[in-house]
Amino acid sequence: MSNTSCPPERLYLDFDSFFASAEQHFNPALRGKPIGVVALDSLYTGCIAISREAKALGMKTNVPAREARLIIPDMTFVVARPDVYVRLHKHILAVIESVVPIQHVRSIDEVVCALLPSEGRQSLALAARIKTALRDAFSPVLTCSIGLGPTELLAKVAAEQHKPDGILLLDAVMLPDALANLKLSNLPGIGAGMISRLEAAGVADFNTLWNLAPKQARALWGNVEGERFVQELHGTHVVREQTRKRMFGHSRVLPRDWHSPDRVEDCARQLLAGAARRLRRTDLRASKLTLAMRSQRLRSTHSESAGAQRWTWEGQFQPSRDYRSFGLALSQGLTQARAQMPFVPHALSIMLHGLDAEAELTGDLFAKSSGDADDRDRWENISAVMDELRARFGGKALSIGAHEDVPGGYVGGKIAFGRIPEAEDFEGPSGADGDTHFASF
Ligand SMILES: [Mg+2]
C-alpha cells in the first residue's frame, strides 16, 4: 500500500446514459429532451436507459414506462436497437484506440486502458484527447466520464464521481478522504446482500471499509475477493493468475468491394500493424506469423457455414517485434496467397505467435550474423518511434504499406468484446442508424 503519489496506471471510461445518448446522437431531434429507451414496445416494460435530461428531472433507470410518463408527461420513448448500439460501440472502440490502446472492454459502454508511465504522467491531457477524438468523431451529446487511478477499481470509482462528462484523477494519497462521503452501495461490486453483511459487521461508511485489514475483508466477503477489493481500494493491483499470452491476432470480414488481391493485401497489412502494435505494448517477441483466409464470412464463432474453404500460411522468422520483420514475412505469405489461393477471400486473419520463451529457443537458427542483430535493433527503435507518433498524432499520421483504410475503420475487432455480440449475431436486416424506432404508446 503506497502513500506516495504515482502516475495513474489505469484509465476507466464510461459513457453517460449510453443507449439514450446513442439515440440522441443518431436523431438530433431527440437532443435536449427527456427520453427513455425501452427494451420492448410496451408501456409495462422498464426503461433500460434514460437521457440525462430525464435524470435531471428526477427519473431513475428501470422505472416502467407507464410510471415514467406519469412523472414526466412529455417523455419520449424509443425502442432499443441493439444492432445499432453494437455498431456504434465498435466505432467508439476504434476512436479510443486511435489515442490509447484498450486493455479490456468491460461492457458495451465501458472500457479500461492500462497506461504506460509516460501516459500516466500526462493522464489528464490524455483523457482530454480521448474526449476530443470522440467529440470530433460523433457529436457533443455522446459524452463519457473518465476516471484515472492506480487500479482499475479506483479508476472506475473516479469515473462515477463526476457524471456526466467528467474527468477525475484519484490518487491513492487522496484516500480515504476523497471518498469519505461515498455511499458503499455506489462502489462497484457491492450489492444489497454485501451491504447488509458489512453493516452487520459495523462497516457503514467508506473510511471504515478502507481501514479494514485484508484478513477482515476476506472474512466479511467469505472469500479472497474481499482482500483483493480492499487491496485495489488502496491502490495495489491485484495479481490474479493470468493465462500466458499465446498470440496477438486480428481478423476482419472484408467489405463487398474489398475482395481483389490488392485490397486483401492492404487489409492484411492493416491487421498486421494492429497486431504488432499490441505485441509491442508487451515485452514479447514473435517468431511466427500465420495468415489465414476464408471463402465465406462466418455466421457465428461456433458453427461454420457448410462449404466454407480455408487457406492458411505460416511463416517463421527470427524473434521480432518490428514492422519490417513482420512486413517481410507477410509479403511472403501474400505472394503465396496470390499464387495458390483457390477461392476469393471474404475474411482474413493475421496471427503473430511463437512468443517469448518459445521464440528464444528457435531464434539462433535464424540469426546469420551480428549485422542482422544491429539491423533488428534499429528497426525495433524505428517501430517504437512510429507507435509513439501514431499515439500522439493519430492513426492517419502514418501508415506502412497500406494504400487505403478498410471501410468501417476498425481492424482490431476481436480483442475482448466479452459478451457483446458481433453484428453477424443479429438476425434480419440491420436498421439504419438514423432510423429511430419510436414506441407506439
Ligand atoms: Mg455508462
Image (tube, helix red, strand yellow):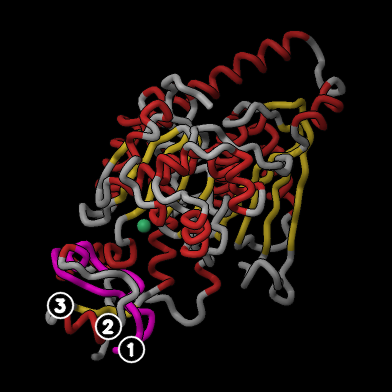
Question: Is 411 positioned to the left or the right of 351 in the image?
Answer: left
Question: Is 209 positioned to the left or the right of 224 in the image?
Answer: left
SS for callout 2: helix
SS for callout 1: loop
Give the quadrant of ligand 1. bottom left
- Which one is in front, 93 or 169? 169
Q: Residue at x 62, y 26 (%)?
A: 322
Residue type for callout 3: Ile
Q: Is residue 122 visible?
A: yes
Residue 308 painted magenta: no
Whether 139 is drawn above or below 421: the answer is: above
> Is the Cβ of the residue at disc 1 closer than 8 Å to that at disc 2?
yes
Q: Where's residue 420, x and y in %?
A: 52, 63
Ligand 1 lies under 8 Å from the Cβ of mark 3: no
SS for callout 3: loop
Which residue carries the number 3 mark?
A: 72
Which comes before the other along the chain, label 3 or label 2?
A: 2
- Which one is in front, 147 or 201? 201
Which residue carries the number 2 mark?
A: 65
